[in-house]
């Protein structure tokens, strides 16, 4: 049980020294013993036993009532010692779980990795940071042969491992769709059926799907209950919410999604995000979405990638470097 | 197995009797006071489970020997409702007292050997051994 025993003679000498001198240095040494005991898994009751033995060595004539009182203390400490052992075992289990999760998180990163498109006339920036180790946000770019790009931004309501597992399924479902299947409304309708059939009803997935056509400078999109993005009009320096109606994925198997389209003008920006961005909190206060837009504006002179990274850093700091929700922000800027 | 002594558990008071017997027995076998206290605590847990969940049963004591070392063998036997999911009760933090280190996982920690057999509707038998060091 106890791999290393407490050194009785050392303990005895120290105790003797302290009884005689009440010297602080003996107490400092006692602190070291205490720490070493924890390191070497020496149980609480073993320490008390060592104390009793040392005391009996120093005072062979120790009155019987004191001896009994020490046995009583030992007995009282047994359950306490057990609880401590359980705690240590649980801590080890926790470390194991943590390292398993970090392996899973790395796998998730590989599994869900995506390549940011590089298209002429546009500048694109992406940041996606999980609140915990595993990301429940998802974004993905599909590069079609005709030069158009499918852009997915999704958020599983809920965080952590279940959300991450769900996302992997979404990715593979989308990959199985035929490649001529490009229309945002059709994609969401197919995906809705997959989610309805395969995902636990307690899980909800919101998704914004866009088909970006750089050559025509247009973007068509549909939304399944996803946090609305924003459109920045350079002409009058204003933001407009990108509204799109549609029910959350998986609620009903017959969901239909409306498809919208808009043209992107020079200097304009398309801003896609998850609610981890718009629901940042400062203390107990939710920030307003105007605040997000102001921050975006303040960095808008930078490249799209620098822009999103700076926005992220701003809100990370605002929340004391402790994200409460996964944070995903994509910005597409049209060159002037 | 032919056990030298058994203590019947029917009333809460019997738990104390079983502890007392176990402590005296382990002292005779040469256990130090820390182990005596650990053994008494293990007996408490086993006896209290019998009293609470099976209504009645017994705790039996025997001396065991293995290549030169001596030990105590304690068997808790009852004909109560049995334990349905043993792996679950052996998990830390499952017991009703929740995360206090006690319960059956605690008994396992206190002793060197632990063996449980249980059948729903028929009863439970838990056998534990501790060796004199
Ligand atoms: N002899 C028994 N017969 C039937 N069920 C039992 C018996 N012993 C234990 N159990 C069941 O196993 C569970 C776990 O037992 P355990 O002793 O580990 O914890 P507990 O008795 O619930 O709480 P604690 O012992 O920490 O106060 C009990 O809640 C009970 O349901
Ligand atoms: Mg119990």
Image: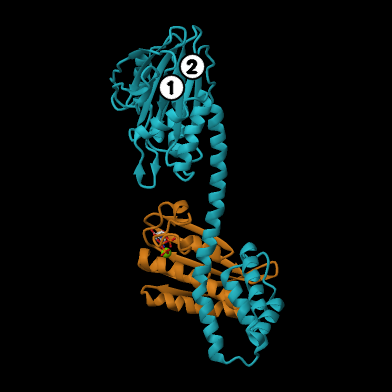
Q: Which residue is mark 1?
A: A152
Which residue bears the numbered disc 2? A142
- Which quadrant of the picture is home to ligand 1? bottom left
A280 is higher (above) or lower (below) than A176: below
Q: Which chain is tinted cyan?
A: A
**Mark found first going from the N terminus, 1 or 2:** 2
Marks 1, 2 in one chain: yes
The answer to whether A135 appears left or right of A17 in the picture is left
Colour assignment, chain B: orange
- Label 2, secondary structure: give it: strand
Label 1 SS: strand
Q: Is residue B127 visible?
A: no
Q: In the figure, residue A13 lies in which quadrant?
A: bottom right
- Tell me what residue is drawn at x 71 percent, y 76 percent: A10
Q: Is residue A297 left or right of residue A256?
A: right
Residue A286 picture location, percent across and down: 35, 41
The reply to whether discs 1 and 2 touch (Cβ–Cβ < 8 Å) is yes
Asked whether, in this view, residue A241 is left or right of residue A113, the answer is left
What subunit carries mark 2? A
Q: Chain of mark 1?
A: A
Q: Nearer the viewer, residue A96 or A302?
A: A302
User: From mark 1 to mark 2, how far is it between C-alphas?
Assistant: 8 Å
Of B43 and A111, the residue lying toward us: A111
């Amino acid at each position: 049980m106890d791999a290393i025993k407490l050194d009785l003679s050392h303990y005895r000498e120290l105790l003797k020294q302290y009884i005689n001198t009440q010297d602080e240095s003996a107490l400092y040494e006692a602190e070291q013993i205490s720490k070493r005991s924890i390191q070497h898994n020496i149980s609480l009751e073993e320490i008390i036993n060592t104390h009793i033995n040392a005391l009996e060595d120093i005072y062979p004539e120790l009155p019987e009532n004191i001896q009994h009182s020490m046995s009583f203390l030992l007995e009282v400490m047994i359950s306490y010692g057990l609880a401590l052992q359980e705690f240590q075992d649980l801590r080890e289990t926790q470390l194991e779980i943590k390292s398993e999760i970090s392996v899973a998180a790395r796998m998730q990163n590989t599994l869900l990795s995506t390549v940011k498109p590089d298209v002429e006339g546009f500048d694109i920036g992406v940041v996606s940071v999980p609140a915990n180790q595993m990301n429940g946000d998802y974004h993905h770019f599909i590069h079609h042969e005709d030069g158009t790009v499918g852009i997915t931004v999704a958020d599983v309501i809920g965080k952590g491992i279940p959300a991450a597992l769900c996302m992997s399924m979404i990715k593979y479902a989308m990959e199985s769709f035929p490649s001529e299947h490009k229309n945002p409304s059709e994609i969401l309708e197919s995906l809705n059926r997959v989610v309805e059939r395969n995902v636990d009803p307690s899980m909800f997935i919101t998704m914004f799907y866009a088909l970006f056509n750089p050559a025509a400078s247009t973007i068509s999109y549909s939304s399944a209950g996803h946090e609305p993005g924003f459109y920045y009009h350079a002409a009058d320096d204003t933001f407009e919410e990108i509204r799109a109606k549609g029910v959350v994925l998986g609620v009903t198997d017959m969901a239909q999604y409306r498809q919208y389209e808009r043209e992107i003008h020079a200097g304009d920006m398309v801003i896609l995000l998850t609610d981890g961005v718009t629901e940042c909190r400062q203390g107990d206060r939710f920030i307003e979405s105007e605040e997000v837009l102001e921050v975006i504006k303040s960095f808008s002179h930078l490249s799209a990638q620098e822009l999103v990274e700076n926005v992220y850093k701003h809100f990370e700091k605002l929340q004391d470097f402790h994200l409460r929700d996964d944070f995903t922000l994509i910005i597409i800027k049209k060159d002037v | 197995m032919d056990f030298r002594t058994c203590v019947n558990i029917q009333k809460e008071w019997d738990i104390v009797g079983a502890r007392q017997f176990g402590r005296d027995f382990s002292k005779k076998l040469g256990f130090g006071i820390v182990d005596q206290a650990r053994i008494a605590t293990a007996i408490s847990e086993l006896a209290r489970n019998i009293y609470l969940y099976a209504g009645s049963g017994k705790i039996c004591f025997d001396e065991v020997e293995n290549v030169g070392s001596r030990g105590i063998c304690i068997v808790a036997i009852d004909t109560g409702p049995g334990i349905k999911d043993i792996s679950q009760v052996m998990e830390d933090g499952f017991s009703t007292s929740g995360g206090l280190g006690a319960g059956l996982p605690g008994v396992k920690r206190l002793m060197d050997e632990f063996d449980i057999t249980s059948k729903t509707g028929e009863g439970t038998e838990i056998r534990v051994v501790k060796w004199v060091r």
